[in-house]
Amino acid sequence: MKLAMLLLASSAIASTAAQAQEHTADQPERERIIVTGDRLQSEGATKTAVPALEVPQPVTVIPAELYEAQGAVSISDTLNYVAGVHANPYGPDGRVDGGLVRGVQALQFRDGMRDIFSFYASIRADPYNFSQVEVIRGPSATLFGSGSLGGIINLVSKTPEFSPQGEVSVRYGSFDRVEALADVTGPIGDTVAGRVVARVRDSGTQTDYVRDDRVMISPSLTWAPSMDTELTVIGLYQEDDGGSTSQFLPLVGTILPNPNGQLPQNLFIGKPGWDRYDGRLAQGTALFRQNFSDSVRLNMRGRYIDSDLTYFTHYPNSYSNPANPYLDADQRIIGNYASGSYATLEVASSDNNLQFDFNTGDNIEHILLAGVDYSWSRVRKEDGLALETIDIYDIDYDALSDYGFDIPRAGDPGFLSSSSTDTETEQLGFYVQDQIRFFDRVSLVLGARRDEVSVRSFGTETIDAGATSFRAGLIAEVVSGVSPFVSYTESFEPIAGTTSDGSPFTPKQGEQWEAGLKIHPSNNILLTLTAYDIRETGRPISDDSTPDDPRDQIQAGESFSRGFEVSGSATLPGNLTAIVNFSYNEAEIEGTGRQLDNVPKINTSLWLTRPFELGEDVVLLLGGGVRHAGDNISYGAAFPSGLVTPAYTLVDAVAELSWSDWSLAVNATNLFDHEYYSACLARGDCFQGADRNIYATLTRRF
């Protein structure tokens, strides 16, 4: 039935696109963007239209064309070839997107406003909905307030264009993935343009019984009565029917030997039909720009998010005794937790600023930004927990309870506990920044910000906190094509949720020193080298005093993350393009002498593409990449000397044949189907790496 609906939807989309094409006189060619780097404009770094090459901070812009060629099916996947980033640190995850930037979990923003405010209270963003993904390494609190210390990820929404264009696609691939996609934009009148981005997906995953189905539609309108005034409104409705691909399998039977053999990668330990990660998301965004003159601009942004989520899952009790969690001598029987949660999330946010462009001399140019932003979020959750037992090597799924397709409640088999939380967070920030350009060769960035935050967990006292953050950076093109830079930045990050004793998290704070060099001898070559030292307090870490619940956390004292990164992109003779990255990172809690859990010291990657002209209007693009994550170590009471998750190396590939307005692309990630674990933690559980994923996409552009 779902397949029939998909085919019907794709036929309707194709019909609509064909009608739109009949009214299009000139068919614009689709520009291919196959390299990234600091040459591209990123308003995420400074909230101004300054080329990222002039920013004293590493900024990577990944255009949609690039991450689609690299086979990205999630926001996490778009980060696979970015310096300083450890993407998918817990393997493919149907619940959340994740990436460690400089050893720190990165916060996600959309159009410059924070997008995610709590774990397991919303569904993942869809990469097809964005024109580019920006990774800003290092703190950005002076502009964004609640930005994580290692860096932030900013998603840039697709918005209407006044030139008519679009595409429709159908896709089929691994795990019975069937999709229809559409992206159509163009003028509606002289001053109004519209756009619709849509996806319908019916798919399985590498984990048995876990779905990855999605319906997403994002209509948008832009009203531009003049060159000085522009208002864009973006709507989004998304519904996901999925589950948790992470099964939290025990160490003994995965990375450690079990006499019954290794547990399979696709093992599902839950109750088919009960386990789920189903969510609904409605979102509205408004973006407004008004130029009062050539030197004064007003920018206003606002967003409202409403989300509902049902999360039912199972995970084995590997935590009471990580070295041997089994209840029998044959090491087959294990406790199996059933965890159910209902969550609602509401977010209201806005960011408003005035930009003043002026000179204080013939060769001294200023871009002064003064703004205020506000965010409010409320997360409500109701949870239930129960415990049964299973033979993990021969699971009797019928014997598992379904709890009346509700969360476990008192009186249910194996019931352990229930709880509810209601957390409200408000943040008000005032910021000012001056970007000063001297003789068109030297850029000085100075910024300051004041934040006031209130975190209220109903049933406990309200925590009020405030912080002042500063930023200073200098970059200079000392000789043609060589730009050294140095910067000091601070961070302030409120955290939704509570510690294991029920107290609200206090905000994290930190600072970073960084120095680097951007080498750009021509428009075709860019090399960035940088070294950094980060200090942070208040990082949430696992609470080892409550081993029965791996979700319990406490806040650490001071921690640090220091290292260096090398990133380069080039277009070489023959239109061969290359992107190369290398990162080294030491991340520890002060005084322990131990690398933080699941933070590899080394990440490196290489991506190459080359087009081949096969005839008139026929082009074959071939490309591929190699990415490597070093081993990581986890420490705990059961493994005081550390548990090592081995390093892994993966190969990706793409082949795309384009002719006229058509293209057929085949993408493959983990091409050789290498089996690996993304992380195995001393607390007791292992996370499977991504299996090989191959899919073909047929696209018609107009």
Image (cartoon, rainbow, N blue to C red):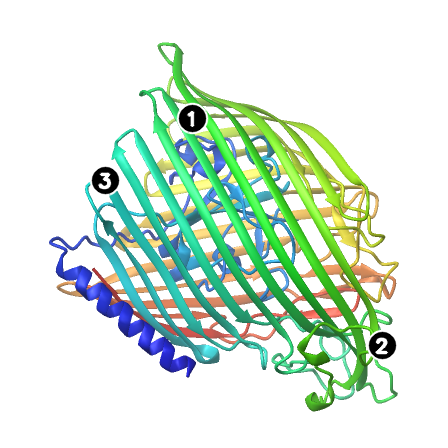
Q: Residue furthest top?
A: 361
Location of residue 607 by image quarter:
bottom left
Marks 1 and 3, how far apart at CA: 41 Å
Residue 318: x and y in percent read: 80, 73
The residue drawn where x is 23% and y is 40% is: 191
- Nearer the observer: mark 2 or 3; the answer is 3
Marks 2 and 3, how far apart at CA: 68 Å
Q: Is residue 619 left or right of residue 642?
A: left
- What secondary structure is found at the residue carrying circle 3? loop
Vertical side of 656 occupied by 347: above or below: above
- Nearer the observer: mark 1 or 3; the answer is 3
Q: Which mark is residue 191?
A: 3
* Amino acid type of the residue tagged 3 in the rendering: Thr
* Amino acid type of the residue tagged 2 in the rendering: Asn
Specify the quadrant that holds the C terminus: bottom left
Specify the quadrant that holds the N terminus: bottom left
Residue 114: x and y in percent read: 55, 44
Q: Is residue 57 left or right of residue 254?
A: left
Vertical side of 330 occupied by 690: above or below: above
Q: Which mark is residue 700?
A: none
Q: Which residue is mark 1?
A: 477
* Amino acid type of the residue tagged 1 in the rendering: Glu
Task: Looking at the picture, tell me which residue is in the foreground, 578 or 73.
Answer: 73
Vertical side of 338 occupied by 505: above or below: above
The reply to whether dot 1 and dot 3 touch (C-beta < 8 Å) is no
Vertical side of 230 occupied by 99: above or below: below
Q: Which residue is mark 2?
A: 324
Mark 3 closeness class: few <14, some 14–19, many ≥20 residues within 10 Å: few
